[in-house]
Image: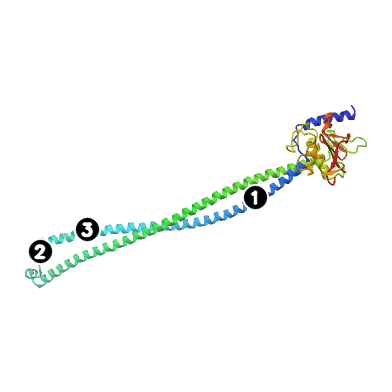
């Protein structure tokens, strides 16, 4: 099997394989890489801003926690005071109960004395004098009467005084209890408010942490995409294994893909890489004009795609549009030939033309064609 037949068979297999590959070029990868880096920078800035907001919220949470602890301590003190006052009130009520019992007993005794006095009609001084058996007996009876009277008066007075004092003390304790209860309620409300604020801050912090975590996950994804793009760019930048024909100016690989010669400008390399990406895709009239990316391309759509990958074209052109594109005449590296019905280009001595597909290869071919009736145009500087 000669070299030309081997080359044709390899080209056909490569073309069939390219039908299943995504349409992507070196220029597309560079654009996606730049966009990925911009997105990564934006995500990092978002994470930094979110971290600053989380730090501010954390400071608020710490302040709320300190305030809550202070209010809880004050509430504990108030509740201890309330418990002490309540104990004093209970003890006072018990004392009052005992005094009331004593008052009841004294009143009962006084009532008995009054009844006895009423029935027996306590003797007056004259009766005591007349009934006494001598002076000593009279004196003893008079002193006994005086002691009884004083005793009754003292019991009655002490009981009344104790009752008044205890009632006053009980009232005072009740007022103190009410006041401390009010203060405790105020402290409790303040504590609950502080707890609500702390809860809101913690909820905000949780939401911020979740948002930052989501952004960080997006950043990881973008950074992974950037790494993949860099690998793909490096792969496309490596010279493919080539089979060079004797005295050939442009080497090509066995799959029919062109390779830029050494010293070619970056734009030329990008045009060739983009041409390689779609070289084996089928022909479709109008393909590549709705969008640079398509599953099949016509003649001007193919040329538009390859030129756009190097930034030499902003939107697809048809063959008529290429007749006035760029600068007139052939270029040093790139020349587009166009008329009203067809367009192709020659890049670094290699023709990129959909008509080459009919030979069972790719859009790249070494053979030149007659350029009569075509307008020759080239990008400035190339």
Residue bearing mark 1: 46
Disc number for residue 104: 3
| Residue drawn at point x = 69 percent, y = 44 percent | 222
| Residue drawn at point x = 36 percent, y = 58 percent | 178
Q: Could you say where residue 69 lies in the image, as x and y percent from the top left?
A: 50, 56
**Contact, mark 1 vs mark 3 (Cβ under 8 Å):** no
Q: Could you say where residue 70 lies in the image, as x and y percent from the top left?
A: 49, 58
Q: Which is more N-terminal, label 1 or label 2?
A: 1
Query: In the figure, residue 356 lies in which quadrant?
Result: top right
Residue bearing mark 2: 121
Mark 1, Cα crowd under 10 Å, few <14 / some 14-19 / many 20+, is: some
| Residue drawn at point x = 27 percent, y = 58 percent | 98
Q: Secondary structure at mark 3?
A: helix
Cα separation between marks 2 and 1: 107 Å
Mark 2, Cα crowd under 10 Å, few <14 / some 14-19 / many 20+, is: few
Q: Secondary structure at mark 1?
A: helix
Report whether residue 277 is seen.
no
Query: In the figure, residue 319 lies in which quadrant?
Result: top right
Cα separation between marks 2 and 3: 24 Å
Q: Nearer the viewer, residue 281 or 256?
A: 281
Specify whether 351 is left or right of 203.
right
- 118 up-or-down from 327: above or below: below
- 136 up-or-down from 93: above or below: below
Q: Which is more N-terminal, label 3 or label 2?
A: 3
């Amino acid at each position: 099997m000669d070299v030309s037949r081997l080359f044709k068979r390899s080209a056909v297999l490569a073309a069939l394989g390219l039908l299943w590959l995504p349409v992507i070029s070196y220029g597309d990868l560079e654009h996606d890489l730049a966009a990925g880096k911009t997105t990564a920078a934006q995500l990092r800035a978002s994470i930094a801003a979110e971290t600053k907001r989380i730090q501010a919220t954390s400071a608020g949470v710490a302040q709320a926690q300190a305030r809550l602890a202070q209010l809880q301590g004050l509430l504990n003190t108030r509740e201890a005071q309330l418990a002490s006052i309540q104990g004093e009130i209970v003890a006072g009520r018990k004392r009052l109960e005992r005094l009331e019992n004593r008052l009841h007993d004294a009143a009962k005794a006084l009532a008995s004395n009054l009844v006895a006095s009423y029935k027996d009609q306590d003797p007056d001084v004259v009766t005591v004098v007349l009934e006494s058996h001598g002076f000593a007996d009279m004196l003893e009876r008079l002193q006994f009467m005086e002691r009884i009277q004083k005793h009754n008066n003292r019991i009655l007075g002490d009981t009344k005084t104790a009752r008044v004092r205890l009632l006053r003390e009980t009232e005072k304790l009740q007022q103190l209890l009410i006041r401390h209860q009010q203060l405790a309620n105020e402290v409790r409300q303040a504590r609950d408010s502080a707890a609500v604020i702390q809860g809101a801050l913690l909820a905000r912090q949780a939401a911020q942490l979740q948002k930052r975590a989501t952004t960080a996950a997006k950043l990881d994804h973008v950074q992974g995409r950037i790494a993949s793009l860099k690998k793909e760019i490096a792969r496309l930048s490596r010279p493919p294994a080539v089979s060079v024909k004797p005295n050939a100016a442009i080497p090509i690989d066995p799959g029919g893909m062109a390779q830029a010669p050494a010293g070619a400008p970056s734009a030329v390399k990008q045009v060739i890489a983009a041409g390689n990406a779609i070289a084996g895709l089928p022909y479709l009239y109008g393909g590549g004009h709705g969008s640079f990316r398509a599953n099949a391309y016509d003649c001007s759509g193919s040329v538009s795609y390859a030129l756009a990958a190097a930034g030499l074209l902003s939107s697809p052109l048809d063959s008529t549009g290429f007749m006035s594109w760029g600068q007139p005449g052939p270029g040093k590296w790139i020349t587009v030939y166009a008329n009203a019905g067809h367009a192709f280009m020659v890049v670094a001595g290699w023709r990129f033309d959909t008509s080459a597909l009919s030979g069972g290869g790719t859009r790249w071919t070494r053979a030149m064609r007659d350029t009569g009736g075509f307008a020759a145009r080239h990008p400035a500087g190339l």
